[in-house]
Amino acid sequence: MSTAVLETNPRRLTGPGTPPSLLRLTRVELRKSYDTRAGRWLLVAIALAAAATVALALFTGHDAMGLADHLELTQLSTSLLLPVLGILLVTSEWSQRTAMTTFTLVPRRSRVLSAKVLAASALALLGVVATLMTSVVAVVLTPLVTDGARDWSLGAAELGQVVLLQLVYVLSGVAFGMLLLSSPLAIVLYLVLPTVFTILVSTVGALDWVADWLDLTTASAPVFDGGLDAQGWLQLATATGLWLGLPMGLGWLRIERAEIS
Amino acid sequence: MITVDHLTKRYGARTVVSDVSFTCTPGSVTGFLGPNGAGKSTTLRALVGLTVPTSGTATIAGRAHRDLPNAGRQVGVLLDAGAQHAGRTGRETLTLTAMVLGVDTERVDEVLGQVGLAGRPAGTRVGSYSLGMRQRLGLAGALLGDPEVLVLDEPANGLDPEGIWWMRGLLRGFADRGGTVLLSSHQLREVEAVADQLVVISGGRIVAQGSKTELLGRRGTVVRGPDRAVLARALQTAGIAVSAGDDDALVADADPLAVGQAAAAAGAVLTELGQAGGEGLEELFRALTASPGTGTQQPAVAA
């Protein structure tokens, strides 16, 4: 520390440069998601959970499982953990107070928020790719460790809906992060609130319509159960509006107007 | 070039910054002085777009911070050295900034060397940094984009005397190469050593501003002799006003040459002759920032 160099003639960089592109900002946000120990371990946990789920199904399952079944199964843990990464993508800027630097470097806050949404979407896609690869390995191993044969069937529509659902979950996490700006609060509420909501609306008979139209768990169930029909799409859209659109809209406004300190 | 024009910030009924105006020109260091809670940080945060002023404007190179094409390349900002991710290493922190700014990673190593964090500290997580090291890292981040303007809030906090000396040199060099520096402090001595211009704020209002010589030119000469009364008479005869200094010293309202000549002319013996030091300066600072009406002095005017 005591040997600081007093620079006499620093190199001048050329020009003030152009504003950082959305792509560049997205790469920065992606890097932020894995350059800390917390982020790295969360990614490792997501991969391990998917692998463990598949292994468990392979070695203890009775029914022969195909690619589609494995993919469905691995979405469970992924859809639970990946949104936490989405939450932290936003809230760590406040808990670690890096929002100050972030928004001083990029004063147009909506650009940073857009980059975070894109980065979270990329993570969701990566999550599906990772679970797909794990599922492929599971199918390859199927005849070796079980009596079943390899079943490669997986419809494009089903894969598409799985991707969509992961996107909805991750971005819902981002939305909770934006709205609450606190890691513990956002994580707890993200995990607890929809569950409590599901229990509430599915036990009270009169609230059936609420479950159908506003409960994300109920609305997304058909994805793994033969696919969404026209009404299913509508119901998924309204539920997504409540759990993603609304908190993200409010959170976006909150951050745009927030005093950063 | 920084221009703050009639800047006012109110939170409800509380006015934190009231009608503050000043300009910082290229090639100069401006010291933004005031006790804690005077409104320094709020002014700086309004300047870099982290808070929206109630009225008035603050611009950098003629534009609001929000309208700068690539803000980090035009203005280097360090508002709070503690606001860094504890889980990232120093180099990673700067690498993220470099990516946003669009500068190459060589530049990261360059500024790490410049602030004395090259080598092992660069690979250490910020969580285990001392406050002084965080200040250095924050300064490195501010310098990374090679900006023309630096805005620093209490950058000397946590630095050891050697670090403070180093930072003065760095800021002086930055301004001498044509840069504009605005740094806030509640430590008068720290700012006095490096600033060309002073802006003193108290209770949200500017209470004094001007060049350092203008504001601090009122200090005189400290003079001592074996016989204080003889000395005082000698100076008064020469038309130099005197007042009592510390202990048995006198403070004369003239430069040392005139005081020495007056003493010699009267045959008075001197044991000490020199520029009045920081005490006079500090009195000025305390007087300027004392809350009017109450007669009490603001706390936290640390030297």
Image: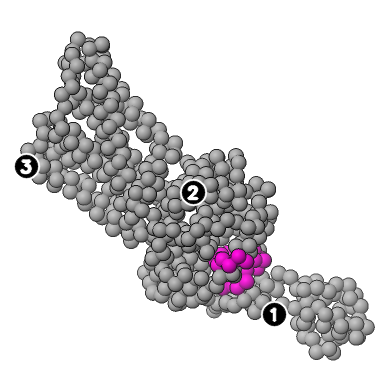
Q: Residue at x 40, y 46 (%)?
A: A28
Residue A115, given in percent of the width and then of the height, sits at: 33, 50
Q: What range is drawn magenta here? A: B175-201
Q: Using a 10 Å C-alpha cutoff, classify the residue at mark 2 as few (fewer than 14 neighbours), some (14 to 19) or many (20 or more).
A: few
Q: Using a 10 Å C-alpha cutoff, classify the residue at mark 3 as few (fewer than 14 neighbours), some (14 to 19) or many (20 or more).
A: few
Q: Which amino acid is tagged 2?
A: Asp
Residue A250, given in percent of the width and then of the height, sits at: 26, 55
- Mark 1 or 3, which is nearer the eye? 3
In three-dimensional space, the C-alpha distance between marks 3 and 2, rounded to whole angstroms, equals 52 Å
Classify mark 1: helix, strand or loop.
loop
Residue occupied by mark 1: B218
Residue occupied by mark 3: A231
As for residue A178 lying within the magenta part, the answer is no
As for residue B188 lying within the magenta part, the answer is yes
Q: Is residue B239 visible?
A: yes
The image quadrant of residue A260 is: bottom left
Q: Which amino acid is tagged 1?
A: Arg
Q: Is residue B225 or residue B139 the one in the foreground? A: B139
Residue occupied by mark 2: B104
Identify the subunit bearing mark 1: B
Q: Quadrant of the C terminus of chain A?
A: bottom left
Identify the subunit bearing mark 2: B
Identify the subunit bearing mark 3: A
Residue A119, given in percent of the width and then of the height, sits at: 32, 44
Q: Residue at x 7, y 38 (%)?
A: A229
In three-dimensional space, the C-alpha distance between marks 1 and 3, rounded to whole angstroms, equals 83 Å
The image quadrant of residue A150 is: top left
Q: Residue at x 25, y 11 (%)?
A: A144
